[in-house]
Amino acid sequence: MMATTHVFAGLVLAAIVALIAPQFAAVAAFAAILGGLFPDLDVVADHRKTLHYPVYYSALAVPTLLIAVVVPGPATVALAVFVLAAAGHSVADCVGGSHELKPWQAGSNRAVYSHYHGQWLEPRRWIGYDGSPGDLALSAVLAVPALFVFDGTVQVLVVGMLVVSIAYATLRRPVAAGVDWLVRRENQ
């Protein structure tokens, strides 16, 4: 899935926090954005392996959420939302497509590496690939709560990320074809 889809999913969590405890709205939104993006920072290393922890983030989410409920404060709420967003990101990549240049061809059975299981988890392909029409639709739906619950900077960021999502989804296949063409040309 697109990084923006993960951010919007995190912002759904932040919107819930904002409705329950408005004093933590800003910190929850910030943590949701960071947590939604964080696992994809491994794109410069071994993508979907180095910072993607579907089991460990999910396990860590339970105590961090409990701590935030029992001892609510900016730090505990931020940590809980960050970990929940990172967990959601890592698990969501399992239900998407594989990580490869042309994931719509389903040439790989590697979605996300599970450090707990010591192996790659297979993609479920419920969302075909990052930038697919289904991914864009999911991204747009997940963005809606943030547009209604937050204002100012968060709204501007959400609208900007929606524009980026539309552009990415529009260009995803042509860019992959262009990269493929360049690689073939280099190898001639």
Image (cartoon, rainbow, N blue to C red):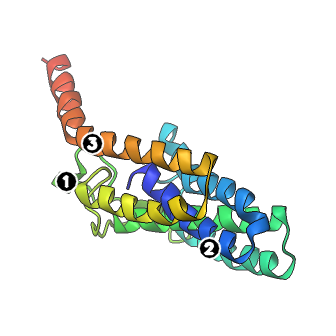
Q: Name the residue under label 3.
A: 101
CA distance separating discs 2 and 3: 35 Å
Q: Name the residue under label 2.
A: 16
Q: Residue at x 87, y 77 (%)?
A: 71
Quarter holding residue 95: bottom left
Q: Which mark is residue 55?
A: none
> In the displayed structure, does residue 119 sit left or right of residue 68?
left
Q: Residue at x 47, y 68 (%)?
A: 91
Q: Residue at x 76, y 81 (%)?
A: 66
Q: Is residue 67 above or below residue 142?
A: below
Q: Residue type at mark 3?
A: Leu
Count of picture labels? 3
Q: Is residue 50 above or below residue 22?
A: above
How far from the left and from the top, in percent, is residue 159?
Answer: 46, 47
Q: Can residue 182 be seen in this snapshot? A: yes
Q: 112 or 137, which is in the foreground?
A: 137
> In the displayed structure, does residue 49 sit left or right of residue 75?
left
Quarter holding residue 59: bottom right
Q: Residue type at mark 1?
A: Trp
